[in-house]
Image (cartoon, grey):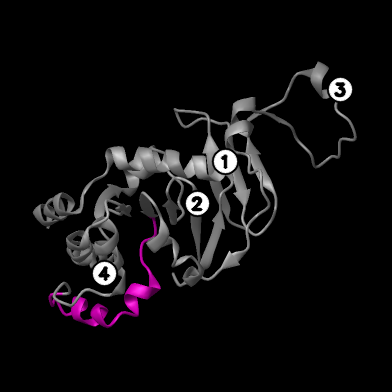
Amino acid sequence: MTLRFLGTTSDDGDCPTLYEIEGTDEILVQGDRETDPEHLVQLRDVKPSETFVRVPRALLTRYAPRAETPELQPFASIAHLFREFRHTAWRLETRRGYASDRNSPLWARFLEGQDVTAEPPNAWRQNVAAQTEQGKTFARVRIADEPLTQGQQFLLARSSTNVAAGEDIRYLTRAQAEQLRLPDIDFWLIDSRTLARFAFDDDDTTLGVYVTQDPAEVLAACQARDAAWHHAIPAAEYAERVASTV
């Protein structure tokens, strides 16, 4: 089963850390093993398979989920949030490719080296323009491999269309993301209050989203956003950097 990084109170990459075991209601705790004999002898009902670790109280206070694991729901069920949010809709994109892009009619044109930006605004970009005209913010950070995957090249080639509609799209290398200990999940964070975390299958097809307002999960997403945004660079600048290395 997949582990999902929840958070850590360490700034230098050491333990302690919390993970969610996806598909279960269990949390995995990483920390220093307890070795104090006086403590070990006081533990109760110890099974041979059990071990014990120490973690700071702050780790559990900040990151331990306080609500039950949300149910998976279709992405369409949160479409209204992108019209009704009050301030900010922020996205983290971490995957190396998306089935929705490969299934797009623009994909074949991209593979042939054609321009994939000359098309009328679709419903998404029309809504982005309408919301940003009201002073709201649409923004996202994309994690990019070095070299870019084909799917990431496609998104970079298309980024100017979303930027023109009003989105602020920025890029961060995967090496930087790993150094910052960013989560390796895709999500939307709405008004720093509602988290919609994507679920994908092995073919990069979106299965749906887990939606929560659990304070611990929202806090972790806000911290990831702040760290990513601080280090990421605008899409146009990143595209120039990529072009200069080709």
Earlier residue among tags 2 and 4: 4
Q: Does the magenta stretch include residue 111?
A: yes
| Residues packed near mark 1 inside 10 Å, few (<14), some (14 to 19) or many (20 plus) | some
Query: In front here: 128 or 46?
Result: 128
Q: Are marks 1 and 4 in contact (CB under 8 Å)?
A: no
Q: Kindly identify the residue that appears in the image at 36 percent across and 49 percent down.
A: 87
Image side of residue 78 versus residue 160, left or right: right
Q: What stretch is highlighted in magenta?
A: 93-115
Residue 59 at what x, y percent from top left?
59, 31
Q: Provide the residue designation for mark 4.
A: 126
Q: Quadrant of residue 103?
A: bottom left
**Badge 2 amino acid:** Thr
Q: Determine the CA span between mark 2 and mark 3.
A: 44 Å
Earlier residue among tags 3 and 4: 3
Q: Provide the residue designation for mark 2.
A: 194
Q: Provide the residue designation for mark 1.
A: 216
Taking the view exactly as shown, the residue that stands out farthest to the left is 244
Q: Where 211 sits versus 32, above or below?
A: below
**Badge 1 amino acid:** Ala
**Tag 1 secondary structure:** helix
Q: Kindly identify the residue that appears in the image at 60 percent across and 27 percent down.
A: 58
Q: Where 76 sits versus 237, above or below?
A: below
